[in-house]
Image: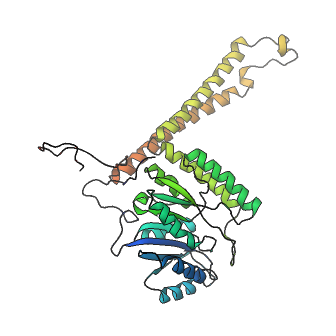
Amino acid sequence: MTTPTETMTPAGRERPPGPASPPAGAVDLSVLIPVYNEAENVAPLHQELDAALRPLPLSYELIFVDDGSIDGTAAQLEAIQARDPRHVRVAFLWRNCGQTAAISAALDMARGEVLVPMDGDRQNDPADIPKLLATLESGYDVVSGWRKDRQDALLTRKVPSRIANSLVARLSGVRLHDFGCTLKAYRRRVLAGVRLYGEMHRFIPIFAAWQGARITEQVVNHRPRRAGKTKYGLGRTFNVVLDLILIRFLQRYAQRPIHFFGRLGMWSFLAGFACFLGMLYFKYLCPWPGVGWFRGMEPKTFIETPLPSLTVMFFLAGVMSILLGIQSELIMRTYFESQDKPTYVLREVRQGNPGSPSAGSTT
């Protein structure tokens, strides 16, 4: 396992806003809570968070992001913030943008050195946060919650989740049991430059692993929903599979798309060439009807087969795939060069100071 990393930016360039560097008024811990139509849960959740975090010898903030709720959640959050202005910050989105967008908004607001997202439905237990922090302090950069005794429906939640988690772990190489558990703890530096789209908040540990973060998991309590309605369903499992395809592509080909589309194009050319050989076979080598297994068949020329159409189709598909690869390569290079983004992640440089008799000092 590699050591923690930091994304380096070229000299003279400022980091983009986000969780890379803590802003003024930094605190030790930021708890990020996206909520949508959780009017009955936010006040009890705040009480549980307060009871779990106040005894800890650290400064903290609770960031609630209301994702366009229409059930009175906004009024509840305003009341909570008025009662506890020292610790509570609240953001209101104009409309329902989704859990990933709400978490991304909370990340942009966060001032903590450690970031802990969690669900707002009270199924995550705030009492587990000190355990995550203790594990994090033992030398890890990411601690992922594992709902080992999950309190959800078997067929619509547990079984699809196990299949999806197994698939994600196998394809990403990040061996976790529960990618879907929102309750996780991150060091701020491992989220430098991470931008979330779609429903990719569950894949943040994979993004962190790409930067060399040390990752482990901690068994956490999972409670049955006590109020409100679940926003999860079987359909989200299919979204996970689609997001996983994108993650896998980004992991392998984000910086070399021509290799993916080029290989696809070459396979298309080979398929077209095989169809062309089939045409030659029918034209010059095909036995006469009545010979061997051709007995009883009507004589055919290659024009009467689908081979000419397949040859042209595969050839054009190969050309388009290679052209798409070239276009993707140009877009990728424009993305990196226009923003002076490095294509590597630098952990440390060791070198001797010029003119110094000693060598091996760290700079």
Rendered residue at 43%/42% (across/down): 329
The quadrant holding residue 354 is top left
Left or right, 298 with respect to 208, comes to: right
Q: Residue farthest to the left?
A: 355
The image shows residue 28 at horizontal and vertical percentages of 40, 71
The image shows residue 128 at horizontal and vertical percentages of 56, 69
Rendered residue at 56%/87% (across/down): 75
Vertical position of residue 235 compared to residue 65: above or below:
above
Taking the image as drawn, is residue 93 in sight?
Answer: no
Q: Residue farthest to the right?
A: 296
The image shows residue 307 at horizontal and vertical percentages of 69, 26
Vertical position of residue 35 compared to residue 305: above or below:
below
Vertical position of residue 267 compared to residue 211: above or below:
above
Rendered residue at 58%/79% (across/down): 45
Vertical position of residue 201 compared to residue 259: above or below:
below
Left or right, 336 with respect to 66, comes to: left
The image shows residue 207 at horizontal and vertical percentages of 48, 53
The colour mode here is: rainbow
Residue situated in front as seen by the camera: 295 or 102: 102
**What is the count of numbered marks?**
0
